Image (cartoon, helix red, strand yellow):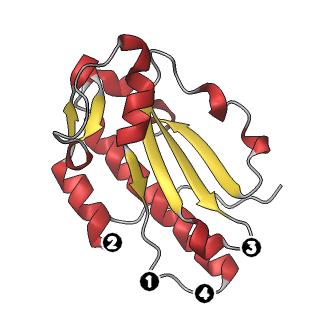
């Protein structure tokens, strides 16, 4: 198994791509059924009646953030290293912004970075959800993901 995760280096929010800065500046809100949602990603197009059992799944669908890579180098090793640092840094800042909400104690992030042959096209995402309702259990075995480097991180894992 290859290891891509950095030892905790966090880039300043102001150094992240503007798309990510906009999401961070907008912050979080409490939505239907007490869901914790990134304010910039939730809007009137989403259904607002959610059974409690579906909260985590709905949060994951809405809080699904694409991490831009347009300015990263072509070299695979450098690209992956910088992409992981960017995704980790975004996650860290988003977790810090969520701390003021009571439900953030169970906030979880899944970082997915494409590492296969088409690593530049595969894309990188960070998804956030809380551990309640029918928590998405398909992240319990990360070894099954062969084309992605995956990390599941709980807000309580970080010193914020």
Label 1 packing within 10 angstroms: few (<14), some (14-19), many (20+) = few
Residue 59 appears in the rendering: yes
Which of the 4 quarters of the picture holds residue 152? Answer: top right
Left or right? Give the position of 54 relative to 45.
Answer: right
Residues tagged 4 and 1 counted as in contact (Cβ below 8 A)? no
Q: Which badge, 2 or 4, is on the more N-terminal residue?
A: 2
Residues tagged 1 and 2 counted as in contact (Cβ below 8 A)? yes
Which residue has dot 3 on it? 117
Which residue has dot 1 on it? 71
Residues tagged 4 and 3 counted as in contact (Cβ below 8 A)? no
Mark 1: which secondary structure?
A: loop
Cα gap from disc 3 to disc 2, whole angstroms: 25 Å
Residues tagged 2 and 4 counted as in contact (Cβ below 8 A)? no
Across the whole image, how many numbered discs are drawn on residues?
4
Residue 9 at x, y = what percent? 50, 61
Which residue has dot 4 on it? 74
Left or right? Give the position of 139 relative to 97.
Answer: right
Label 3 packing within 10 angstroms: few (<14), some (14-19), many (20+) = few
Q: Which badge, 3 or 1, is on the more N-terminal residue?
A: 1
Which residue has dot 2 on it? 17
- For the point 43% across and 13% down, the residue is 53
Cα gap from disc 3 to disc 1, whole angstroms: 19 Å
Q: Which badge, 1 or 2, is on the more N-terminal residue?
A: 2
Cα gap from disc 1 to disc 2, whole angstroms: 9 Å
In front: label 3 or label 1: 3
Left or right? Give the position of 157 relative to 79.
Answer: left
Mark 4: which secondary structure?
A: loop
Mark 2: which secondary structure?
A: loop
- For the point 35% across and 13% down, the residue is 51
């Amino acid at each position: 198994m290859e290891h891509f995760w950095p030892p905790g280096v966090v880039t300043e929010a102001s150094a992240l791509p503007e798309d990510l800065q906009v999401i961070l500046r907008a912050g979080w809100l409490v939505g239907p059924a007490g869901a914790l949602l990134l304010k910039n990603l939730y809007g009137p197009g989403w259904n607002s009646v959610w059974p409690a059992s579906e909260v985590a799944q709905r949060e994951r669908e809405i809080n699904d953030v694409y991490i831009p890579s347009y300015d990263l180098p072509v070299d695979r090793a450098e690209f992956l290293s910088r992409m992981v640092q960017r995704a980790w840094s975004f996650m860290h800042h988003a977790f810090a912004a969520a701390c003021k909400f009571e439900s953030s104690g169970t906030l979880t992030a899944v970082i997915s970075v494409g590492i296969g042959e088409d690593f530049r096209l595969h894309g990188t995402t960070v998804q956030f959800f809380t551990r309640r309702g029918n928590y998405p259990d398909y992240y319990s075995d990360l070894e099954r993901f062969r084309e992605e480097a995956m990390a599941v991180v709980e807000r309580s894992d970080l010193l914020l």
